[in-house]
Image (cartoon, rainbow, N blue to C red):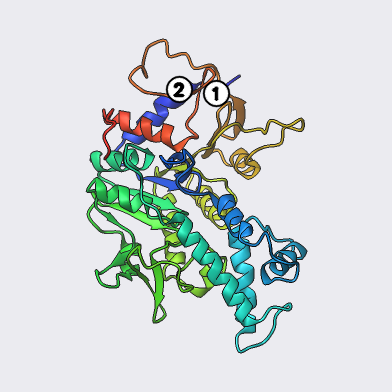
Amino acid sequence: MKHDPIRHLRNLRLLLSQNKSPLGFLLAAGCPLSVKDPSTGNPLLPDMSGLTKLISDNHIADTATSPYKRLIDELVKAGKNTKNLEDVLTYIRSMKEVSTGGGNVRGFTEGELSTLETEICTTISSAVTKDLPEGNNSYRKFARWVGAIDREVPVEVFTTNYDLLLEQAFEEQSVPYFDGFSGSRYPFFDIHSVEDNRLPRYWARLWKLHGSVNWKSVKGEVCRLSKDVVGSPELIYPSKLKYDQSRKMPFLAMSDRLSSFLLQPQAVLFVCGYSFSDEHINDTIINALKVNQTANVIALMYGAMKKTTPSGELNFPEAVKRAAERPNLSVWHDEEAVIGAQRREWAKFEDQKKEFSNFTLKMVGDLVSFGDFDAFTTFLSELIGDHTNADK
């Protein structure tokens, strides 16, 4: 028995069209890959592994005794993932806390650790501080859809990305949104508005779970500054220490919003571009789904479920594992899906009644694919009759 794509496309369309149920999106590192740099044809922004490679490439010529090479050696010894910037920054900041006052930690001076932290933050900032190129793209399509729908319950957008592509797309399309900050000169984090969530329903909510390139610590408080203020070591970037350092201002508050959203009756969260590699986010989602059986999370995964290797291991094993344990978490790959805790192949797409003849569906062979964020936002656009190829 196989999953019926027509049946689940109908359900997808229905969930996206309802205006009274809580509707949210978790957009992660894979989403910016759908936007191409017109001059090179490459993704506009790198993903996490791409960012790590940029930093590593800066140290190819380093000697084995350089601070960076010694850091990588220490991470390997500690069993940390050297390709995960979260682990790298956490390790640096943990040692830096201990070294405060001039002491050495594992052979690193406080100055060496500060230099490494600043370099990594500057590299991240430079790599992700880019504007959307001219022309239609997934972010503009998503923003147009958010601005076009009339909902009784506001759309909530959660993102692990620290770029400003969503902000640019919303502002271009005149979509009002609240990101937790209030003010104009040094917008401050307004935790009361985040927790009460009583702003106008036509305002989208934008929650940046891992911080942003335009967040900065000013006199001990997190503020949102101009996108041109980048590269400072005070800027907040992903690190497991963020939850301790900032209490509820604002990282834990953002995480709490994700949990609160999923605890609402009939809440639906669409997950795009997320590899399920962040245990904190995974636990937040799973714990909420356990408590609230009426909530549903649909993860649209890029590509095939299995790798094209003799062993055929899974591309995103944690996603499949979690979905197999939770009936209200679905994972859709190109050729297989886990829906209702049942892992099955997709049946051939045969739209005999022409229900989706007006939709530009991305096909992989005779199967429908939504793992590409651009394909999913095209579906969103066509739900509102938007077939434009305009620049905005």
Q: Quadrant of the N terminus?
A: top right
Q: Which residue is more in the foreground, 30 or 152?
A: 30
Q: Which residue is more in the foreground, 302 or 333?
A: 302
Number of residue marks:
2
- Who's the residue at 31% across and 28% down the image? 382
Q: Is residue 341 visible?
A: yes
Q: Is residue 376 left or right of residue 90?
A: left
| Residue that label 2 marks | 7
Residue 267 place in picture, x, y as percent: 40, 44
Q: Is residue 47 left or right of residue 170?
A: right
The amino acid at mark 2 is Arg
Q: Is residue 258 left or right of residue 143?
A: right
Q: Cα distance, mark 1 to mark 2?
A: 8 Å
Evaluate if marks 1 and 2 touch, with contact meaning CB atoms under 8 Å apart: yes
- Who's the residue at 70% across and 80% down the image? 105
Q: Which mark is residue 3?
A: 1
